[in-house]
Image (tube, rainbow, N blue to C red):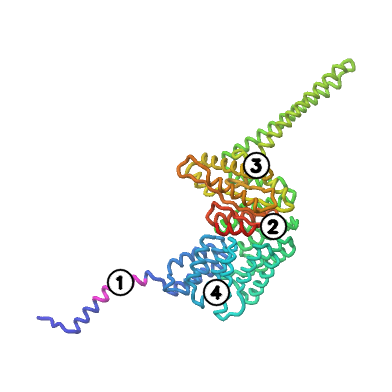
């Protein structure tokens, strides 16, 4: 029997073939994509974590979601995810990632309806321009914020604009102007009840900066008022924000000599810190807490506890072998002092015995007494010489033969009045040198760096090992130009040191601060911030700041 082939049969066969071949491909495409409802579900989960102040899990979930969606298919979702990621990277101070995220968000949010995303990106990039003293670029970003808001039909400037103007005022030490513009930003936030893209009240950051400005002016009562107002804005369960506010408040209480209040808020911060996230502990290290606790103990008169904390901070950067050597030195010093004390006690006992002899032996006793006095005098002189020697050892770093941390910090404490100029010098990639060439080579590097610094500074300047591969220089100068010249000379000489090891090159980064208003931990924190800028801008450079910095030196820094 012959099967009659008709048009109907042909269409049926082709349809079956189409279904058989393409259906699996369609299914596979659906499985590889992600639907809008799935994105909404995951964003809702992120929102719940942020409401519970679990920011680190939220950040990881957002990074995972960003990898699943594409800008071309899910533009609105992609930009929302990117904005939340940027807010969290800024909160956790992940500088390198937040810069790249801000650039990506800026490029993709070019439509006017996305102007708020672009303002966020501009605010982050303008902040890094402020840190790097790039005033021209910062001003361009602020002007673009105004233009974006105007083009979208929104009257007035955004709060981020006034915050940026306030940052620029800090660079010229105009703290009153900075406070004026920060208060303008705060009013906009209050009027509009603004929160950032991860649900944090924008005024928390603004009043944190206001407190810093009042501290810089020495108006500690106003600074405390700003930080206490933040306590009302921060939820009791938001441990990480509360830690940051409490640490600032504790510092403020120390500056105003309210030690009991400082201890109270510090203990609360220390308790919250235990349960904080790993990302938060990277941004706010235990070293920061130890440093503040040591300062509180010192101001409370507990010098022993303060010294113990400072020693612990210093020993964090020492090898086990160095710690053991220092322990042996301390033990040897104690044994020596006890033996000398016992000798003196024995001599005094002999003298007392001689003086009690009978009158017939008076001449003999008198002669013996004179001899004993001479012996004691000579022993005292010898003891004084040895004591000076051991004191010199106790204040000298045994590896580099420069003053140790205790000694350089004592020198630093003596410059609390008048104009101050210090620099922190850090060996770049020192861990890599140790890992590649060994710790003996690392020790040799520290010795040569220390000797180069000591030979490059002037007679009245001082230098010491601040910890690990970091050194401090205290300049005796009323000219920032002279200090910068010396720092640059040190950097250049170290860069040009010759080494016998293959492909080994050693450089240093320097943060230099010059001020007649900053002091104590504030001055150190400023130097540390400038050192961090040197690191973040590529290392092997000198970053400085000062009220008398010349335009020429500033131009050199900005072009470096």
Tag 2 and tag 3, C-beta contact below 8 Å: no
Give the SS element for disc 3: loop
Residue placed most toward the observer, 243 or 465: 465
Check the picture and name the quadrant holding the N terminus: bottom left
Q: Is residue 191 above or below residue 349?
A: below
Q: Which residues are the magenta region?
A: 17-30
Residue placed most toward the observer, 1 or 223: 223
C-alpha gap between disc 4 and disc 2: 35 Å
Tag 4 and tag 2, C-beta contact below 8 Å: no
Q: Earlier in the sequence, mark 2 or mark 1?
A: 1
> Label 4 crowding class (10 Å Cα cut-off): few <14, some 14-19, many 20+?
some
Q: Earlier in the sequence, mark 4 or mark 3?
A: 4
What residue is pinned by disc 4?
Answer: 116
In the image, taking residue 58 as reference, residue 334 lies left or right, namely right
Residue 28 lies within the magenta run: yes
Observer-side mark, 3 or 1, equals: 3
What residue is pinned by disc 1?
Answer: 24
Tag 3 and tag 1, C-beta contact below 8 Å: no
Q: Which mark is residue 403?
A: 3
Q: Is residue 172 above or below residue 463?
A: below
C-alpha gap between disc 2 and disc 1: 65 Å
What residue is pinned by disc 2?
Answer: 251
Give the SS element for disc 4: helix
Observer-side mark, 4 or 2, equals: 4
C-alpha gap between disc 3 and disc 1: 75 Å
Observer-side mark, 4 or 1, equals: 4
């Amino acid at each position: 029997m012959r099967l009659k082939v008709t048009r109907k049969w042909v269409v049926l066969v082709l349809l079956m073939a189409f279904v058989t071949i393409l259906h699996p491909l369609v299914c596979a495409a659906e499985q590889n994509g992600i639907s809008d409802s799935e994105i909404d579900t995951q964003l809702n989960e992120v929102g719940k974590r942020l409401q519970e102040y679990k920011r680190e899990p939220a950040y990881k979930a957002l990074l995972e979601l960003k990898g699943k969606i594409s800008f071309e298919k899910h533009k609105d979702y992609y930009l929302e995810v990117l904005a939340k990621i940027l807010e969290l990277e800024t909160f956790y101070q992940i500088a390198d990632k937040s810069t790249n995220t801000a650039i990506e968000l800026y490029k993709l949010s070019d439509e006017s309806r996305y102007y708020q995303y672009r303002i966020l990106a501009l605010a982050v990039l303008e902040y890094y321009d402020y840190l790097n003293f790039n005033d021209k670029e910062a001003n361009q970003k602020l002007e673009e914020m105004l233009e974006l808001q105007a083009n979208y039909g929104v009257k007035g400037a955004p709060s981020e604009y006034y915050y940026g103007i306030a940052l620029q005022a800090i660079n010229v030490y105009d703290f009153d102007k900075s406070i004026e513009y920060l208060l303008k930003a705060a009013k906009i936030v209050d009027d509009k009840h603004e929160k950032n893209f991860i649900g944090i009240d924008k005024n928390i950051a603004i009043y944190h900066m206001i407190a810093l400005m009042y501290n810089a002016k020495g108006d500690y009562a106003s600074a405390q008022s700003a930080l206490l107002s933040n306590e009302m804005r921060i939820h009791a369960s938001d441990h990480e924000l509360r830690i940051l506010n409490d640490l600032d408040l504790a510092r403020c209480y120390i500056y105003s000599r309210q030690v009991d209040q400082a201890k109270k808020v510090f203990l609360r911060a220390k308790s919250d810190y235990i349960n904080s996230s790993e990302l938060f502990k990277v941004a706010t290290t235990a070293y920061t807490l130890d440093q503040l606790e040591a300062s509180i103990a010192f101001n409370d008169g507990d010098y022993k506890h303060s010294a113990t904390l400072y020693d612990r901070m210093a020993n964090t950067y020492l090898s086990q072998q160095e710690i053991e050597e220092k322990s042996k030195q301390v033990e040897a010093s104690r044994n020596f002092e006890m033996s000398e004390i016992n000798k003196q006690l024995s001599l005094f006992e002999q003298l007392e015995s001689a003086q009690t002899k009978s009158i017939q032996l008076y001449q003999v006793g008198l002669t013996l007494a004179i001899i004993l006095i001479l012996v004691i005098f000579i022993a005292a002189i010898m003891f004084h010489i040895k004591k000076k020697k051991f004191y010199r050892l106790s204040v000298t770093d045994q590896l580099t033969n420069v003053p140790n941390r205790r000694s350089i910090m004592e020198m630093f404490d003596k410059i609390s009045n008048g104009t101050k100029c210090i620099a922190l010098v850090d060996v770049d990639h020192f861990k890599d040198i140790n890992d590649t060439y060994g710790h003996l080579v690392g020790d040799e590097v520290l010795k040569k760096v220390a000797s180069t610094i000591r030979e490059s500074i002037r007679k009245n300047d001082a230098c010491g090992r601040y910890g690990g591969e970091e050194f401090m220089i205290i300049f005796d100068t009323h000219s920032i130009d002279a200090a910068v010249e010396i720092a640059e000379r040190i950097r250049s000489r170290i860069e040009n040191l010759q080494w016998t090891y293959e492909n080994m090159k050693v450089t240093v980064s320097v943060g230099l601060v010059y001020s007649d208003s900053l002091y104590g931990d504030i001055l150190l924190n400023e130097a540390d911030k400038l050192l961090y800028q040197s690191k973040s801008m590529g290392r092997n450079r000198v970053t400085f700041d000062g009220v008398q910095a010349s335009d020429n030196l500033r131009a050199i820094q900005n072009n470096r």
